[in-house]
Image (spheres, rainbow, N blue to C red):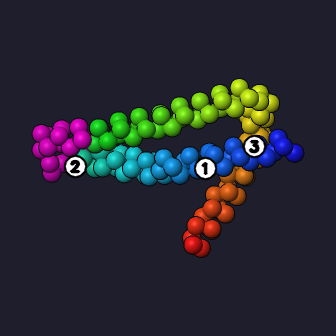
Amino acid sequence: MIFYVIVFFISIVIVEFLFFVNFKKIINSSFETFKKIQKVILSKNNSDHWKEKVLLEYSKRLLKNSIILISIIFAFIIFLFVINFFNKEIIIFLFTIKGSVLISCEILIYYYLRKKLITNY
């Protein structure tokens, strides 16, 4: 029983961390930048000099977002190593189908409840 409580707390930590780092905003920003790059490249009305300047700025944005995303993934890996240090069975369980389904359901339930509670305040 305590095993499932620990898995539930891991789920909460994951969701709260993703909210803390504004994961959705970073992903949306990356997709918007990709769309802008595509528009600039396909545009025939603008000079090549202007395209070079704009593409450089968009590339910098993408680089920044990519570094942030890599840092988030690195933080998750460190988190998994810390969990593994204390209890190896939990990590093994999380990478099974049953564990993946359980943590996914817990994350979805927690996300839904969090969203409902925050909108009610």
Disc 2 or disc 1, which is closer to the eye? 1
Q: Position of residue 98 (x, y in %)?
A: 80, 41
Q: Which residue is mark 1?
A: 15
Callout 2 touching callout 1 (CB < 8 Å): no
Q: Residues within 10 Å of mark 2 (few under 14, many from 20)?
A: few
In the rendered structure, find residue 7 and report the number of the disc placed on it: 3
Mark 3 vs mark 2, CA separation in Å: 50 Å
Instruction: Write down the region rendered in magenta.
Output: 41-57
Mark 1 vs mark 3, CA separation in Å: 13 Å
In the rendered structure, find residue 97 and report the number of the disc placed on it: none
Up-down relation of residue 45 to residue 116 (above or below): above
- Left or right side of 36 for 85: right
- Left or right side of 88 for 29: left
Q: Residues within 10 Å of mark 3 (few under 14, many from 20)?
A: some
- Left or right side of 32 for 84: right
Secondary element type, mark 2? loop
Mark 2 vs mark 1, CA separation in Å: 40 Å
Under mark 1, the amino acid is Val
Secondary element type, mark 3? helix
Q: Main secondary structure of the magenta part?
A: helix
Q: Position of residue 44 (x, y in %)?
A: 18, 48
The answer to whether residue 11 shows anywhere in this view is: yes
